[in-house]
Amino acid sequence: MYEEKEPVKKVKKEKIKHENKFFTNTKDNKKVKENENPKKDSNVKSKGIKFLTFRADYVSVLIRFGIFLLFAFVAIFIITKIRNSGDAKTFTENMEKMKEVAYIYYKVDKNRPVLVGDEVVMTLGDMEESSLINELKDKKKNVCSKEYSYVSLIKTDENNYDLEVYLSCGGEAQMATYPVNYDETSDNEEDNDSSSEKTLLYELKRTVTTNEQYSCPEGYYGAGKYCVSFNNTDVIDATAKYKVKPEINTKAKYKASGYEYEYVDPILNTNPSSYKCSSGYTLNGTKCVKEGTVYYKTSNSYSCPNGGTPSGTKCLFTTYASYKDEIAYCKNGTLINNSTCYITKDYSVSCITGKKDSSINACYTTYSPTEELSDWLFDGKVTYREDYDVDHLESETKKYEVDEWLDNGKVRYNRYIKVYNKICDDGDELVGSTCRHYDESYEKRYCSGSDYHLSSDESECYTYDDPYYRNTNGSYTCPDGYSKKGVGVDTTCYKYENATKTTNKVPYCGAIYDLTSDGRCLRTVDADLVNEEIVYTCPEGYTKTGSGQNTKCYKKARTDSYYYCSDSEATLRGTRCIIPSSTSFLAYSCPLGYDLSGNKCVKTNAVNRILATENDGPTTKEEVIWSKEQNLDGWTWTGNTKEAE
């Protein structure tokens, strides 16, 4: 039976009503005031008559203002008292709801703690989620905390428990504890044998990692940097605190009967594989080849075979001026290092192939030009009689257009003709009626005279000769052909010479083509492999939609109605979705006068004390508890069981 007594624990933050003497014995107080000091009353009356004849003084104003403040204070006090009493009433009602619901829930034996001292906790959020209670609000419409508000049940002996209710709303909190009794025989009148059955407990263990700085040997318990030992009566097992999440029983969702589409995989038939190319390409094995047009671009490059620094189309030569009383010079050629005359002349050419053009000292071959018909060209004006038929004069290369009708009956015409032009290949020269193709590969260059040598790039013939000397006035001078820059010791000499121009005709291809070693422009891509061309069909009775890999086969089928659960953790039982209750371990606790050490409670009066071992880092230890639940998150069953005492 439910036995409600006075709360064991004091209520935290609970507003306590105090008796206010301001609102009691008001009539008696008035009588006392009326009978006190009658002389003073008469004096006040006489003074009041005097005040009527004179202006109110400063003291009377202060008295009136004080009376006004007194009445205002009383009004505010009364309003606040009424409001606070309403809040307290709401808190009390909400705690009563939580107490009643918890008492009924814990009537079920499996929901109560098994061992004396054990505690089970259920938050307000768990109660609301399991539909045990509706959302709670205080007088100011603040929603009560689902996380911090809770009810708990602590087993004190075989049939007695402490029911603790804690409620937090809008920044205020209250807590009260009520002794309750669950008589096993009265709760199970329908099955008297159940009272004799004992609850089976399971031994669970887990390994935890701690950052404890000190550790103790077996038989000792930690106390800061010391280890202490006790008599057997001074060490007891710590009691466990569990968090219980009640069973959630909700209505299953209903899916009415109807129609749905049933899909099956299509049937695949294959044709032999083959390679194919896009239009314009030729298949070559597993490649597709397309030939494009070869283009040519002419580029000029300049080099300085005789030394110097390239500078545009010139070669820059620099040297320091020399100070001499006697200066060297060359009658022919260029003075080098003031010690040698470098003399050059044109090379001679003999033709390996073709003919020699002495005017430019080069070799060429000839071929006939191609003829291309030009556009229409104006060829003058002619005049004929009006009745003269000019059409018979026109041909593919001649035509007439009327320019003006004359007054004398004649007509003036513009005559246009087309002529055949002789065309040579790009870069070749038309001379008379033939095309000349110049090519350095046709030439064999040599130097006439035994003293001359052909330069390495075959651009000229050269020889060396001794310079001549003449006297100077001892100034800074530059070699012949050099210009002087600067003064004194900073005098330098420089000159520019034409760089050797090389014209190259370079073939190139369009952006998508590659130039081959034989001068062709080709584009090569992988041929498309048609892998055993797949044909998709559907089984008999199914409708086909889509094509290729997107082919789907379906048919419309009728479905039966059914119930289902949207929560994956729930189990369907008939028309209800059930999420079973769960229990998780929270912490250990000890009675008053004991300290918690691991899963033991020890008294502070140690029999023996030694220094603890200081740990270098985190340590691991094994915790063991007895639980009526075989499966708890984070715990493993050791295989041992026992009956609850």
Image (cartoon, grey):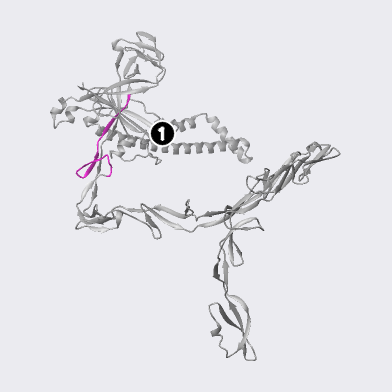
When asked about the image quadrant of residue 2, the answer is top left
For residue 605, say whether it is visible. no
When asked about the image quadrant of residue 584, the answer is top left
State which region is magenta.
Answer: 566-587
Other residues around mark 1 within 10 Å, as few (<14) / some (14–19) / many (≥20): some
Image quarter of the C terminus: top left
Percent x, y of residue 634? 30, 28
Question: Residue at (72%, 45%) from the top-left corner?
Answer: 343
Q: Which residue is mark 1?
A: 172
Percent x, y of residue 412? 62, 85
In the picture, measured across the screen, residue 244 lies left or right of residue 225, that is left
Percent x, y of residue 94? 33, 36
Percent x, y of residue 63? 57, 36
Of residues 36 and 289, which is closer to you in this image?
289
Q: Is residue 540 above or below residue 394?
A: above
The three-letter amino acid code for the residue at tag 1 is Glu
Q: Is residue 136 above or below residue 378?
A: above
When asked about the image quadrant of residue 276, the answer is bottom left
Image quarter of the N terminus: top left
Of residues 84 and 589, which is closer to you in this image?
589
